[in-house]
Amino acid sequence: MKDAAAQHARDYMKSRGFGAEMARSWSIGWMPDSPKKFLDWARANKFTGRELVESGLVKLQNEENPRSGLFVRFQDRLMFPICNEIGDVIAFSGRQLRENKNSGKYINSPETAIFKKSKIFFGLDRAKKPILKEKAALLCEGQIDAICCHQLGIAQAIATCGTACTPEHAKLLKRYTKSVLICYDADSAGFAATEKAYRAMVPEGLAVRIVEMPAGDDPDSFLKTHGAEAFRKLLENAKEFFDFKLERGKATGLFDSATERANALNSCAELLSLMTDFAARDHQINVVATHFQTSTTALREAIAKVAAKAKFQQNRGQAVKENSAEDRGSVEPTRLHRIIAYLCHLALSSGPAQRFLGEQFETIHEADRWVEGVSLLEAILGAAPDPASNAAVNAFISSLPEADRLALAGESISLDGVSLDGVQAAEQTLSLLSGTVLQRRDAAVKAELKKPNLSAERMVELLQEAKEISNLLRGAGQRSEFDDELPASTWKPKIPEWKTRWQERATK
């Protein structure tokens, strides 16, 4: 940056309100417009051609000829180091300084063994401690936005590196927080990117809120105009995703006709189906149902259908892949818990049982973490082949991945003490499933409570969860070790909520 030829780079930095201290703090530099100048510097510092190629800063002019010479990827660009979460530089991002329509405004290093764009956040090495302190991450659209936030004391800011948010990003972020504030540009592209980020985050159990920027602003411009305190107020007033989506839909006329409202409701059902935090989803179901003036029961049914259909399509795609594979000898059957195997049998052999189970999607989906084979049951309920038609059932089974077909062919289809009547059998088996899930949750919590060096906060969370599980087990007429000191008279079996709802509907 001190080179005389870098004056225009320094001028650009000043125009954005960034000085020499910021450049030093973030190790921002300038890549010369002359490839020779950079290559001479690299040789003087004893970097080999192989090292330069592996770094991603250069590439071979002819990939098939190692002697073809080197091409410098970045020319006349402002260079931002990209670090992994422990602070090691693993790649670079270069911002264009002079307009060139044949090249992007930003270009990143190519992916290497250590740089995967879908798994890296710009600034996370600096932001991880502030994220833990604030109990939330601030996700910005660009590196300049994130840097500007840090410079003004909003140090939980991060950004992706030239890609949309991915499930891998969400898994990484989940190590540090359960909450994400998304702060993208207030335009159509920003809104679309916000929804993509939501789709990546919520399946991992992250809570998503949206920071609303004034039209035409991004964090960088807003901070320079209004200051850090005004920006913090925007963060404090961040909206729940569905409040944001519904308000924007109303403002842009997306609910003006009956058809548009129906499409919007289906869209919300699909987005709700992605949420794995069921307590949070219950609240958002109430928000969406109230907005569309529909019942929560109808919305839950729509969510169940959307989720089951998605699961079926996923399994069908897997079946196509497997059916095209040459080697079929190594396929192992999908592991099915015996309760799930029996529910699969009921769903394929009894129309009333299939309809009943289709309306218990949340109960079934919650079991996915604790028993094997739930995804196969969800695929059956999503496709809903007519049990009265052998052709329909056989066609569906033929569409499944081979591992699933083998599992259905090889599992026993009886359970001791369960009625042979379709709906009654489904009710009884679902009760068995709920009890099994609770017992496995109970065991997992107790195992974690025995681990050394648990934080006080985590200890409190686990004890609260243990108490909740104990109450649920008592409601189902079972006991946990949490109840050991309680007299038997304090716990009584209760009718599960899902069964009460089904019985109420069945009598109407």
Image (cartoon, helix red, strand yellow):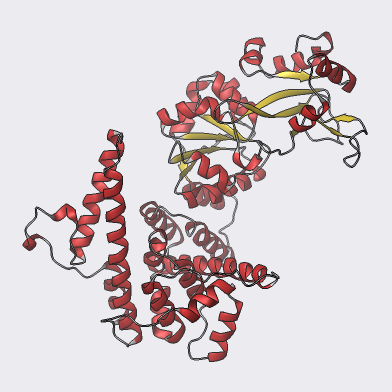
Image quarter for residue 336? Answer: bottom left
In the depicted structure, whether residue 380 falls above or below residue 61: below
Position of residue 239 measured from the top left corner of the image (x, y, whole percent): 46, 42
Image quarter for residue 8? Answer: top right
In the depicted structure, whether residue 293 falls above or below residue 154: below
Compared across the picture, whether 238 is left or right of 329 comes to left
Residue toward you, 99 or 367: 367
Residue toward you, 351 or 321: 321
Q: How many marks?
A: 0
For the C terminus, the quadrant is: bottom left
Position of residue 274 measured from the top left corner of the image (x, y, whole percent): 49, 56
Compared across the picture, whether 238 is left or right of 95 comes to left
In the depicted structure, whether residue 109 falls above or below residue 276: above
Image quarter for residue 44? Answer: top right
Compared across the picture, whether 30 is left or right of 453 comes to right
Q: Residue at x 32, y 87 (%)?
A: 420
Q: Residue at x 20, y 56 (%)?
A: 470
Position of residue 58 measured from the top left corner of the image (x, y, whole percent): 82, 30
Query: Seen from this angle, which residue lies furthest front?
Result: 329
Position of residue 306 measured from the top left corner of the image (x, y, whole percent): 52, 67
Compared across the picture, whether 386 is left or right of 65 comes to left
In the depicted structure, whether residue 474 falls above or below residue 41: below
Asked whether residue 417 is in view, the answer is yes
For the N terminus, the quadrant is: top right
Asked whether residue 508 is in view, the answer is no
Q: Residue at x 35, y 83 (%)?
A: 414
Q: Residue at x 89, y 20 (%)?
A: 34
